[in-house]
Amino acid sequence: MKLERAIIDQLESNLRDFRTIDDLVGKNGLIKRLVKKLIDQLLQEELIYNFRL
């Protein structure tokens, strides 16, 4: 899996904008959103791989 440039740009932008620890690790924090995006991408790749066999 390869991180798309758009994801990296969004991550850099978000890192500049966070002000509190909750912005980073809170309920809707950057880490949670990043993990969700990565899991979604992994699941999509898994579906593509399984249906290609």
Image (spheres, rainbow, N blue to C red):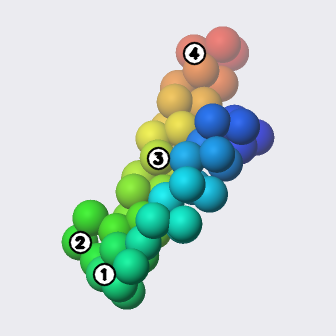
Q: Position of residue 48 (x, y in %)?
A: 59, 21
Q: Which circle's residue, 1 or 4, is located before the other in the chain?
A: 1
Residue annotated with mark 1: 22
Mark 2 element type: loop
For the point 42% across and 72% down, which residue is it? 18
Residue annotated with mark 4: 51
Report whether 30 appears left or right of 29: right
Report whether 5 appears left or right of 26: right
For the point 55% across and 54% down, which residue is it? 13
Q: Which mark is residue 50?
A: none
Q: CA distance from mark 4 to mark 3?
A: 21 Å
Q: Position of residue 47 (x, y in %)?
A: 53, 26
Q: Quadrant of the C terminus?
A: top right
Q: Are marks 1 and 4 in contact (CB under 8 Å)?
A: no
Mark 4 element type: helix
Is residue 22 in view? yes
Mark 4 Cα shell of 10 Å, populated few (<14), some (14-19), many (≥20): few
Q: CA distance from mark 2 to mark 1?
A: 7 Å
Residue annotated with mark 3: 37
For the point 35% across and 84% down, which residue is it? 20
The mark lying in front, picked from 1 and 4, is 1
Q: Residue 17's quadrant in the figure?
A: bottom left
Residue annotated with mark 2: 27
Mark 1 element type: helix
Q: Which circle's residue, 3 or 1, is located before the other in the chain?
A: 1
Q: Are marks 2 and 1 in contact (CB under 8 Å)?
A: yes
Q: Amino acid at mark 3?
A: Lys
15 to 39, vertically: above or below: below
